[in-house]
Image (spheres, rainbow, N blue to C red):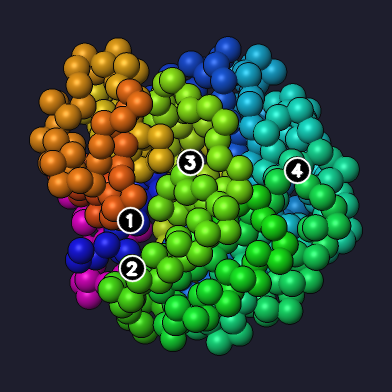
Amino acid sequence: MKQIYQQYMYSYPHKTAYRPVKRALVEQQLVKLAGQEVQLYVHLPFCQTKCGYCNLFSVAGCSEETIEHYLDAIERQVKQIGRLLDLQKVRFCSLVLGGGTPVYLQTGQLARLLGIVERFCGVIPEKVDSVIELSPNQTTPKKLDFLKTQGFQRVSLGVQSFQADELRALGRAHSPESCHAALRQIAQQQFAQFNLDLIYGVPGQSKESLLDSLEQAMRYTPSEVFLYPLYIKPGVPLAGQCAVEEQLAMQLYKTGRDFLKAQGYFQTSMRRFTRQPPEQEPSTGCGFDQMLALGCGGRSYLGALHVCEPYVVQPWACRENLERFLQKEDFLSGLSGYLLNEQEQWRRYVIKNLLYYSGIPLADYKARFGGAPEEQSPLLSELLNRGDAELRGGRLRLTEQGLSYSDVIGPAFISKEVAARTAEFYHSKDDKIPCRLP
C-alpha cells in the first residue's frame, strides 16, 4: 500500500503527462464537437488564499480589475472557438463553474460570465445540469439568491473539516463558524442538490474528530458527501512540512465510510456518498465524454485529444500563467495535451468504469474492445481472484474491499509512457519542486 494516497487519481492521463500540442491538431479535434453532446466547464482560478495542499490552478488575492480582464479573455476565447465551431449547434448538456472559487466573483461579474456563456454557447443554467463550487467565506445570501434565480441546480461547498485546528493545518482561510453560516444560507435557498467536501488524513486528526465533523455535516442533510484523502504533491505549500500517515488514513476512510453508510448514504466510489442511490445503471460505460473548457485551468476532452493550458503547481507559476492568459489572443496555441491511442483509451475506459460502483459493463466492453475484460487483462483477472472484484449483473465491479483500495488499483493501470512522462514532469535538481512544462 505504499504511496496509496499520493497516487489518488481523478482523471487519466493526468496533466503531468501532457506535452505541447500543435495548433492544427487542436483545431482538427475541436471542430468534431459539432452536433455532439458536450459538457461545458468554465474555470475561475481566483481564491482568497492558496490552501496548503492545493495542486490545482488557483491564484490568491486578485483585484477586481484582474477578474474583469479575465472575463475579457474568456470572451475572446469563446469568440475564437465560435469562428471554427458553431457553438449554438453543439448539444451542451451541463454547465460547471469550477475553480478556484467561482463565488470569489461578485454577482455582477457572475452575471457577465453567464451572459457570455448564453450569448455564445446558448447555455442557460436552468436548462442544463448546472453546478457551481462554493467556499464558506465567499458564500453570501446575495450570491446564493442570484444563483438560485439563475437556475443553478447543484452547489458544492468545500468544508474540509469542522475542526478549527484541522482547518489551520490545511491552510484553509475559513472557520467552523463560517462553514455553518454558509450551510444555513444554502439550506434556506433549497437548491435541488447540494454536496459538501470533507478531508481525512489531516495532521492531528483522529477518528473522533472526523466523526464529529461528519455528525455536524449531517445537520444539513447534504445530498452528497465527498470524503477525500489528504494527499500532498510536490510544489504545494505543505510539501515537505508534513506526511500522510497511510495506515491511519485508511482507518479514517473506513470510519467515515461506515458512518455514512449507517446514515443511509449509498457509496458510488471511494470518494462519493449519495443520499439517493442511482435509479438505473447506464448500459454503456464512461470515459469517452466530450468536454469544452473555458478559462485558464480547465481541460477539454476533444475526442481522443485531452488538452489544456500548461499545467503548473507553485503559486508563482500559477500567477505567471494567469498573466499570460490575460494577454492571450490565440487560445488554440501554446497548449499542452495528450492524444490517446487505442491502448490509452482502453486504460481510461477501465479506470473510469472500474473505480465507479457500477463497474465495467460487459456487453459494452465487448462491443468496444472485442472480448471479456478479465480475459484481456491479467490485472483484472488478478483482482477477481483476490476478491477485490466480482462478476455480477453483467458487470465487472469492485467489491467493498476493492473499492477501499481504489488508490492502488487505479494507478496500476497507468501505462509506462504516462508514468514516465509524469516522473519527468516532477524531476528537478532537488527532486521536490516540479518543473513547468517546456
> Which segment is the magenta one?
420-438
Residue at position x 75%, y 43% in the image = 192
Q: Are marks 1 and 2 in contact (CB under 8 Å)?
A: yes
* Marked residue nearer the N-terminal end (4 or 1): 4
Residue at position x 42%, y 29% in the image = 286
Q: Are marks 4 and 2 in contact (CB under 8 Å)?
A: no
Q: Which residue is mark 1?
A: 404
Q: CA distance from mark 3 to mark 1?
A: 28 Å
Q: Main secondary structure of the magenta part?
A: loop
Q: Which residue is mark 4?
A: 192
Q: CA distance from mark 3 to mark 2?
A: 30 Å
Q: Are marks 4 and 1 in contact (CB under 8 Å)?
A: no
Q: Which residue is mark 2?
A: 250
Inspect the magenta stretch and tell me whether residue 425 lies in it.
yes
In depth, the one of 298 and 398 nearer the eye is 398
Three-letter code, disc 2: Met
Three-letter code, disc 3: Arg
